[in-house]
Amino acid sequence: MRRKNILSLVIISLVGLIMLALISAQIIYSESINPQERFIEIKARKFSFTPNIIKVNKGDTVKIRFISEDVHHGFFLDGYQIQTKAHPGQEGSLTFVADKTGRFTYRCSVACGEFHPYMAGYLTVEPNLRFSVFGLIIIFIGLTSFSFIVFLERREKKNGQR
């Protein structure tokens, strides 16, 4: 009789895991259909960008408004090979999809003075966190179910020995 209870518990746990996996896949799929749009304004002045660190998620559509506050500056994003330029009082703009994860350097592409080679910032494209969270939830539920089954079997053996 107890073996039937354990088998039922295992089947229920597996069905629960499969349902959670399907729900997770649906959420991940719907996120890839509706990526977020990020609007970022980057200001350039001699030898620095503001902000100099930008974080987005993979799949986001990134729109950059590039503003020069003092002299002619350029914006070039390594890894994506896209660029724009701006004179004081004028704006440059670009749009792209952040489809590669990692850390990418952006730099001034117009010689703007003696410290021009050091004028850089970083774009960090992070992986989809929803996928990681749901993966951890599935693993946690699986390990919890397995631990519970082992506990029940040990209890059954202990009660059977008496």
Image (cartoon, rainbow, N blue to C red):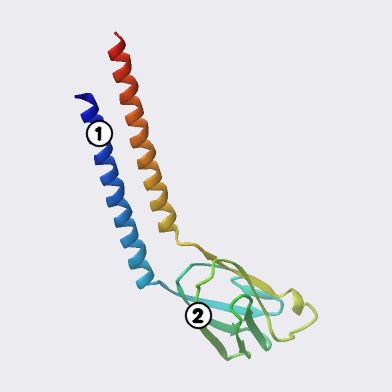
Query: Percent x, y for residue 10?
Result: 28, 37
Residues packed near mark 2 inside 10 Å, few (<14), some (14 to 19) or many (20 plus): few
Q: Residue at x 77, y 83 (%)?
A: 113
Q: Are marks 1 and 2 in contact (CB under 8 Å)?
A: no
In the rendered view, would you say 75 is above or below 153?
below
- Inspect the image, locate mark 2, and give the three-letter code of the amino acid beneath it: Phe
In front: 75, or 18?
Answer: 18
Residue 88 is marked as none
Q: Quadrant of residue 140?
A: top left
Front-lying residue, 50 or 9: 9
The numbered mark at residue 7 is 1
Q: Is residue 4 left or right of residue 27?
A: left
The percent coordinates of residue 111 (x first, y second) are 74, 86
Q: Amino acid at mark 1?
A: Leu
- Quickly name the residue at label 2: 96
Seen from the viewer's position, the closer of residues 146 and 29 is 146
Write down the quadrant of residue 42 in the picture.
Answer: bottom right
Report how far apart the C-alphas of labels 1 and 2 lie in the structure.
Answer: 52 Å
Residue at 29% over, 43% down: 14
Q: Tell me where residue 153 sits by quadrant.
A: top left
Residue at the spot 30% in from the left edge and 56% down from the top edge:
22
In this rendering, the answer to whether 86 lies above or below 11 is below
